[in-house]
Amino acid sequence: MKKKLILFILICCPILWYLFIPNEEEFVLPIFTPSDLRSNLVHPSLVGNTEHTVPDFSFIDQNGNTVTETTVKNKIYVVDFFFTSCPSICIDLTNNLKEIQSEFIDNDDVLILSHSVDPKIDNVERLQKYASINNINNEKWFLLTGPIEETIRMAQLGYFAIASIPNHSENSLIHTENVILIDRNRQIRGIYNGTSSLEIRYLIDDINKLLND
């Protein structure tokens, strides 16, 4: 009888534990606003804001097509800043973003936007060549060029990808390893080091969380 009682306890206790002990709540991705970030990453006009939506934009991609906020409507997308002649971090950025492209190649709800910070050099023809060399899917991954003032505006006011430098000139190229995750509502949901393979895996996991929301 005693053995049966012990056996009963051993079997039932784990079941009762599972049924009555609440599971930890699943991690929910934060929504980043200016008030959540270091002040040097936030334009003075936005400091303290508790809400933020990526502003409208218009750039040209590697195929000569116009890419706007309509292109990413109801999409989850990843943003970075690069230039084709960059000999350092841009190589790692592009190689790591290939992992994102590969992971979600069949999912039309996930896109990648790479802004060139050297529009004088990175015209449509050069971006097209860069896309070809790097096996970039033209329907998934857009290499964007446009006036440097607009690129800086988006980097500072839209994505908080670079420090808010008051007199950032076109002679000073934006050089950042930051990769930004944007949700279907054009809200910032994550900022990652795009040169880190580990953080790219975190980014992939976070994209999947947004897809399952």
Image (cartoon, rainbow, N blue to C red):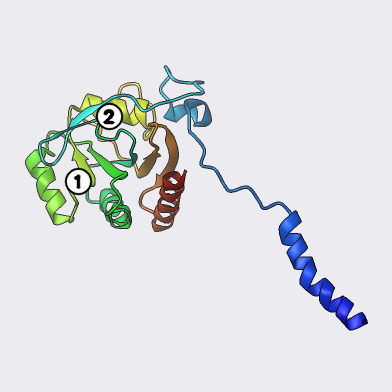
Residue lying at the far top in this picture: please name it: 45
| 204 sits left or right of 14 in the view | left
Q: Which mark is residue 69?
A: 2
Residue 110 as seen in the image, left or right of residue 22 = left
User: Does residue 170 appear in this view?
Assistant: no
Residue 165, compared with residue 104, is above or below; it is: above
Residue at the spot x=40%, y=26% of the render?
53
Looking at this view, name the residue that lies furthest to the left.
125
Q: In this view, does 171 lie to the left or right of 195?
A: left
Relative image position of residue 73 (x, y in whole percent):
30, 33
131 or 84: which is nearer to us? 131
Relative to residue 139, is residue 133 depicted above or below?
below
**Is 80 placed above or below 45 here?**
below
**Neighbour tally class for label 2: few under 14, some 14-19, many 20 plus, Cα within 10 Å:** some
Q: Is residue 20 visible?
A: yes
Q: Quadrant of the N terminus?
A: bottom right
> Please, what secondary structure does the residue beneath circle 1 have?
loop
Compare marks 2 and 1 and give the one earlier in the sequence: 2
Residue placed at 35% from the left, 21% from the top? Answer: 166
- What type is the residue that disc 1 sits on? Glu
Q: What element carries label 2?
A: loop
Residue at far right of view: 2
- The numbered disc on residue 130 is none
Q: Residues within 10 Å of mark 1 (few under 14, many from 20)?
A: few
State the image quarter where residue 152 is shown. Answer: top left
Q: Where is residue 133 in the image (x, y as percent from the top left)?
A: 14, 55
Q: What residue type is labelled 2?
A: Glu
Measure how far apart labels 2 and 1 are at the Cα level.
Answer: 15 Å
**Residue, disc 1:** 139
